Image (tube, coloured by chain):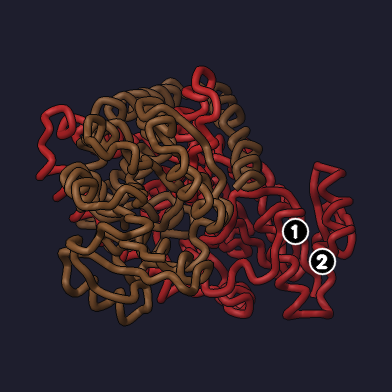
Chain colours: A brown, B red
Amino acid sequence: MKIYIVGIGLIGGSMGLDIKTIYPEAIIYGVDNNENHLQQALALGVIDEAATLENVSDADFVIVSVPVDVAITVLPEVLDLIGENTIVFEVGSTKAPICEAVSSHPKRRNFIATHPIAGTEFSGPSAAIKGLFQGKTNIICEVERTAFKLQEKALDLFKAIGMRIRYMEPKSHDKHIAYVSHLSHISSFMLGKTVINKEKDEQDIFDMAGSGFESTVRLAKSSPAMWTPIFKQNKVQVIETLEEYISNLTQFKDLLIKEDYNAIFEEMQSVNKIKEILNGMNVTK
Amino acid sequence: MKIYIVGIGLIGGSMGLDIKTIYPEAIIYGVDNNENHLQQALALGVIDEAATLENVSDADFVIVSVPVDVAITVLPEVLDLIGENTIVFEVGSTKAPICEAVSSHPKRRNFIATHPIAGTEFSGPSAAIKGLFQGKTNIICEVERTAFKLQEKALDLFKAIGMRIRYMEPKSHDKHIAYVSHLSHISSFMLGKTVINKEKDEQDIFDMAGSGFESTVRLAKSSPAMWTPIFKQNKVQVIETLEEYISNLTQFKDLLIKEDYNAIFEEMQSVNKIKEILNGMNVTK
């Protein structure tokens, strides 16, 4: 089995590690513009060989795991080069622009649009971990546009690494993911900014920070190179979520100003049901 | 050693468990209005006996771990009843109103104002865990207003359960903690609200949520009964942090509207230094 991973970071690298575990005979070729990342990936055993795309024609799988702006230009190039039995998939956090970029490509049926809901706040090959996808959701878009045999091949791989499959339209994916992922990242980045700015004139403020703060700002460690193009491609949806979030925060602030503590209590109590929702997530994931 | 814990929840209960481990001879008396919590605490071995405050006069320690609005009324009552060698401490997330409530009490020198920066999003005796305070910070306010011998007694206990001590003025505590704790809770509650509201008309949205969302909304599981009075007592500071947070979010939204993706990249990159800050926290905590 010949696997090409284009962009060996957290997601691509972790896929490589899982594929090696499940299919020991697989040869994993790494393609990356960043020579250091290639060397790291080889040293860590994330890939077997550094490669270019020129010999991709007899590959079984090509995993494109690059920032979503790069994916839009790389994907058509990859499709141009692959053979008819190669299945190409991409793993980014936006789906409509990606599907659009390959929509009229003659080899569209060799492509499957996916979004594995898995990751950490870290990036690069050194962030790759085994079992990252176990029990996680993989959202597949426009499945009907992928050749049936190649769908099957891809689904077998996703199931082998432990993923549950959900099917969605690209636009719905992008709309929903703005709420449950993109907004969380902005809230975390801006929370970090607010406290960092304050610390400029208030020393030792972080000496008082506990696990609660750590948990809410964890995503502010994320890679700007990865997230800027996501926000760009999903701009309209992200702005909508930000407007709703800001209006909820403003309303909470106004309740404080009005000293309506009953309403504040009820606000928090009604959101407490997130407990059951998160437990539900944990059961299914 | 006789220890009274007034309010046997996450913090009081966890203190009880650690004290039992370090001082096996200690007898832990639990005082709580909630009969179920008392019975739970007995069943879980968090306390040795259910009690009232009437026999508190020969106690070594009285730990007041109740919501901060209750603390303001309970603390003076406790101080009225204790003996001259009893040290009373309170563990809430606001300090200026608490210190003010006992400021002119004749037994003020038997009181030490503390804020252990430790906890989880859970509450009640069942949330109590051993070793919760190991390596965590305990902020002590107005230490000079506590009798020296009793300071020593309290500090020995805090060090025995693994806490590092920081001294602050109550007003500085309340100002700083608004940034690193109170704001995180509101950002989390309002993030949960924003997504829950969206899910009313968008089914299965949580099916797409991953660990990032889980981490940023974790604090939205917190107890409204505990947090409403904290926001009430620290209203001015919390409103200030909310205004700064909302303005940072609005500015980020405006950069998206203006499509200034270089500025968005730089915003995120400058906040990335939170990595080192959090690592620093982990080293010291």
Q: Secondary structure at mark 1?
A: strand
Question: Chain ID for label 2?
Answer: B
- Quarter of the view holding residue A236: top left
Q: Amino acid at mark 2?
A: Ile
Marking on residue B28: 2
The answer to whether A69 appears left or right of B169 in the picture is: left
**Residue A198: percent from the left, percent from the top?**
25, 51
Q: Quadrant of residue B83?
A: bottom right
Q: Which of the two discs, 2 and 1, labels the residue nearer the N terminus?
A: 1
Viewer-side residue, B170 vs B144: B170
- Locate the N terminus of chain A by quadrant: bottom left
Where's residue B174, x and y in %?
42, 49
Q: Is residue B127 visible?
A: yes
Number of numbered callouts drawn: 2
Assess disc 1: are there few (<14), some (14-19) or many (≥20) residues with their C-alpha within 10 Å of its C-alpha: many
Determine which of the numbered discs, if any, sits on residue B5 in the image. Answer: 1
User: What's the residue at 42%, 49% (across, down)?
Assistant: A216
Q: Which mark is residue B178?
A: none
Counting from the top left corner in percent of width and height, residue A220 is at 32, 52
Q: At x 10% / y 37%, what residue is drawn?
A: B260
Amino acid at circle 1: Ile
Q: Are marks 2 and 1 on the same chain?
A: yes
| Residue B226 seen in the current view | no
Along the horizontal axis of the image, is A106 left or right of A115? left
Which is more toward the observer, B142 or B47? Answer: B47
Q: Are marks 2 and 1 in contact (CB under 8 Å)?
A: yes
Q: Chain of mark 1?
A: B
Q: What kind of element bears circle 2?
A: strand
